[in-house]
Amino acid sequence: MSNAVETTLPSEWGDDERMNFLFSEFKDSREVNTMDWDSKMNFWTALVLQNCRERCTVCVNLEELNKTFRRKEKTPLGLTTVIQSMARCGKLQRELEFAANVDCGWLSWGVGVLLVKPLKWTFSSLLGGSRVALEESFVLIELVKEKAAEVLKLYRNSELASHSVVSFHELCTLTRGVCADESTLCMALLQLQRDKQVAVSSNEGGKVVKFCQPGQARVSTVTDVDIGIYQLQQSEKLLEERLEKLGLEAEKCREEARALLREGKKVQALRCLRGQKRVEKRADNVAGQLESIRGIRDRIAQSQTDKMVLQAYQAGMASLRHELKDVTVGGAESLLDQIQELCDKQDDINQIISGVVSNADDDELEEELKSLLEQSDGNVDIPRDVPGEHPLDLLPAVPSNDLDFNAKQLEEELKMLTL
């Protein structure tokens, strides 16, 4: 654990009485005083996690913890119990056990990088209460998951995201700000491999990491095609750097020729110009090689796109065939004829129902009108089919005497008001 970052200590660190309690050994049994036990355990667990976050690391060991939390020449006596309890709760795990839970493909090359410094592994039972070795390293599960998410996000937001396969060295450079060392990066990659987000491999060019691409549920294994594309990418990068250097060299030759010509040294100037032409010729050759590699990469990308489209066509064809397996042209025509026949039948039924309802409504209305006339005019017999006559024309006129009287009375009252 690196000491480059100063540890942030809690406020009670200056309280001697409180710290004497926290620095003391745990009781043999939690049941003796549950509240004190839990208080002390929660304090040290939170402090260990906080310290590792500040240091951008995911591993701890007892020796480093004793140095980090030393106070007034005293070291905490209960850190062994804290580590045992965190392991029992699944909050941390031995480094080697953590790595062993991942596919053997990683271990073939990863452990050598993983164990940056020599570690002394013990085979005694940690959970059985045995003594924890000072140099034995443990992985904090919560922190390694956080670090794995940071590494994945950093990769996807970088220029490397255009390449599914990247070198371990490039990844170290990219994650330098979030991983304290290579061991921390390896732990994060181990977690990502456990989550099926990365696959690792080793070849003549070194260690490579393949990331799961957006839209994929899990990463596929590193294939020979992936290695070939990676090598093309590395060759392209190397040629680009060489082309840039040749360009600078040619420009340097030209500047030297110009300076010698000003001094009147024509022979030396011509020699520099010849050197410039040679450099430019080499640059043309490199540019041609670079163009060829880019052409191959474009063809590979196009072939991958074509493959994806063909797979989509095949999936669509299989789905369509499955959906139409019980459907025939004759069956479709018969079905349409039956639908049309049913629609015609429904129209006929609607027409019949509409006529009956209309006649019935007319008869009812005629009877209701006759009843109204009998009530208002004393059983007046109205011919039903006399042309030019309407039953409403035979109603008596509305009397107007009362209305005229009321109007005259209002005029008289108005005159009285004006007096």
Image (tube, rainbow, N blue to C red):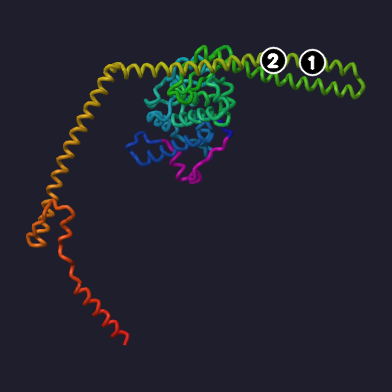
User: Along the horizontal axis of the image, is 288 left or right of 389?
Assistant: right
Point out residue 191 in the picture as x, y percentages from the top left corner.
Answer: 46, 25
Q: In this view, does 409 lie above or below 118?
A: below
Q: Element at badge 2?
A: helix
Point out residue 232 in the picture as x, y percentages from the top left corner.
Answer: 59, 15
Q: In this view, does 353 lie above or below 93?
A: below
The residue under label 1 is which amino acid type? Lys
Q: Most extreme residue toward the bottom, as rendered?
A: 419
Whether 20 is among the magenta residues is: yes
Residue in the image at 87% along x and 18% along y: 269
Q: Element at badge 1?
A: helix
Q: Residue 286 carries which label?
A: 2
Residue in the image at 38% along x and 26% along y: 127
User: Along the horizontal axis of the image, is 369 left or right of 70?
Assistant: left
User: Along the horizontal axis of the image, is 320 left or right of 283?
Assistant: left
Pick the front one: 287 or 137: 287
Q: How many numbered badges does the structure rendering display?
A: 2
Q: Most extreme residue toward the left, as rendered?
A: 379
Residue highlighted by disc 1: 277
Pick the front one: 173 or 335: 335
Give the extent of the magenta segment.
5-25
The residue under label 2 is which amino acid type? Val
Whether 17 is among the magenta residues is: yes
N-terminal of the two: label 1 or label 2? 1
Q: How crowded is mark 2: few (under 14 residues within 10 Å), some or many (20 or more)?
A: some
Pick the front one: 102 or 363: 363
Cα distance in 3D space between marks 1 and 2: 14 Å
Q: How crowded is mark 1: few (under 14 residues within 10 Å), some or many (20 or more)?
A: some
Corner quadrant of residue 287: top right
Q: Which mark is residue 205?
A: none
